[in-house]
Image (cartoon, grey):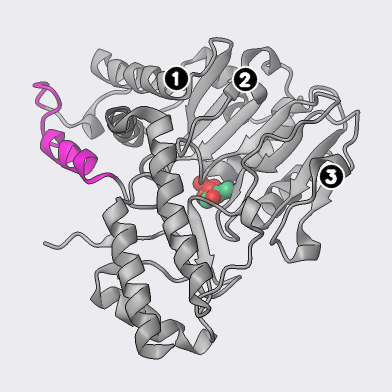
Amino acid sequence: MTRKYNFSAGPATLPLDVLKQAQAEMLDWNGTGVSVMEMSHRSKEFIEIAATAEFDLRELMAIPNNYKVLFLQGGAHSQFAAIPLNLLRGKKTADYLDTGIWSRKAITEASRYCNVNIVSSSAESNFKTIEAVSDWHTNSDAAYLHYVYNETIGGLELSQEPQISNAVPLVADMSSTILSRPIDVSKYAMIYAGAQKNIGPAGLTIVIVREDLLGDTVESTPTMLDYAVHAETGSMYNTPATYAWYLSGLVFKWIKKQGGLAAMAEINQRKSQKLYNLIDVSGFYNNDVDKQFRSWMNIPFNLPAESMNELFLNEATKNNLVALKGHKSVGGMRASIYNAMPEEGVDALLKMMTDFEQDYG
Ligand SMILES: *Cc1c(COP(=O)(O)O)cnc(C)c1O
């Protein structure tokens, strides 16, 4: 068996050590004689697995005690609706930053429930830069300000929390960046992330929400989208994604072993810098995202002509480098280099890209 270096944007590569542990525990978890997949979510064994995962995530991210951590389903897409339903709290308007495709999906969904005020849009720059916060058109009566920390498709990232003077609650989609570096959770009203990029398998969605914001939902809110219900029931109002929860817990332990989020940040910055350096120096590859807003996690790049894409992908596959094809909406290539992508994987990509440029440049 050859494990490939998998640059998929999501579901994405997982740490090999985690997969091996899951494999070893697959048929018999901890002497119980059953797989985690086969356990009741109400059993004391699973409740222990669930509580340990939450404990480790809280410790990793230094989540303050006045925040609830919810382990939900429905992906980030469900949150696009749940956010206005839970966080409008009697208000009629919400502020949204538009930095790309995921911002726009969130905006479209929120528009069903409230007036969306776009504080700033990156459309004019073709999503290559983000306007200075001081130029944003914020609405002082907005219920919250939503932004996408890292646009997974465009590779555009806003890594500084926007300092908004009117202190509107800050909500961030961190699907493709959570756990990539330390984050000051206390600056946010809510953080959410689908697990399948930088946490674990698909099927789990993490919501971290300040508890004083709960319990004032829009009247028609479906029970399954009500954060207060999930908070009161320990995310077990219905059957949660038990196996994804367990596996994510193994990933949290793995990150702790790597040295936590500060250590991850150092590695992630180094990995992304290597790749950007090669792209910038080459004159063959191109990434035209404004340097101060370049993503650490998803690095799109173009070859001199779209017609070379297939050749590049074939060469990559021969070198055991897979899933590098860019999103159909932007073309080119995209290397997603989440926590679980080892630095050797990035080095192997760099070597292949250098060779390719020599052969075809
Ligand atoms: C992948 C992604 C989503 C969508 O996640 P689903 O779990 O498929 O709903 C939303 N936002 C961002 C930033 C993403 O990367």
Of pointers 2 and 3, the one earlier in the residue sequence: 3
Tag 2 near tag 1, CB within 8 Å = no
User: Callout 2: 10 Å neighbours few (<14), some, many (20+)?
Assistant: some
Q: What amino acid is labelled 2 in the image?
A: Ser
**Rendered view: 146 above or below 290:** above
The kind of residue on which mark 1 rests is Arg
Determine which residue is flagged by label 3. 119
Seen from the viewer's position, the closer of residues 154 and 241 is 154
Tag 2 residue: 186
Q: CA distance from mark 1 to mark 3?
A: 31 Å
Give percent across and percent down for residue 326.
50, 69
Whether pointer 2 and pointer 3 mark residues with C-beta atoms closer than 8 Å, the reply is no
**Residue 322 in view in this figure:** no
Give the side of residue 145 with respect to residue 303, left or right: right
| Lateral position of residue 54 relative to residue 231, left or right | left
Can you tell which mark lies on residue 214?
none
- 99 with respect to 55 (left or right): right
Q: Residues within 10 Å of mark 1 (few under 14, many from 20)?
A: some
Q: Residue at x 30, y 35 (%)?
A: 247
Q: Position of residue 299 (x, y in %)?
A: 50, 60
Report, in whole angstroms, how far the alpha carbon at label 2 lies from the one at label 1: 12 Å
Q: Is mark 2 within 8 Å of ligand 1?
A: no
Task: Give the number of marks.
Answer: 3
Q: Nearer the viewer, residue 297 or 192?
A: 297
Does residue 5 belong to the magenta stretch? no
Seen in the picture, residue 32 relative to 19 is either above or below; the reply is above
User: Magenta segment range?
Assistant: 15-33
| Disc 3 residue type (three-letter) | Val
Say which of 131 and 217 sits in front: 131
Q: Nearer the viewer, residue 173 or 342?
A: 342
Q: Position of residue 115 (x, y in %)?
A: 87, 41
Tell me the residue that label 1 is attached to.
Answer: 58
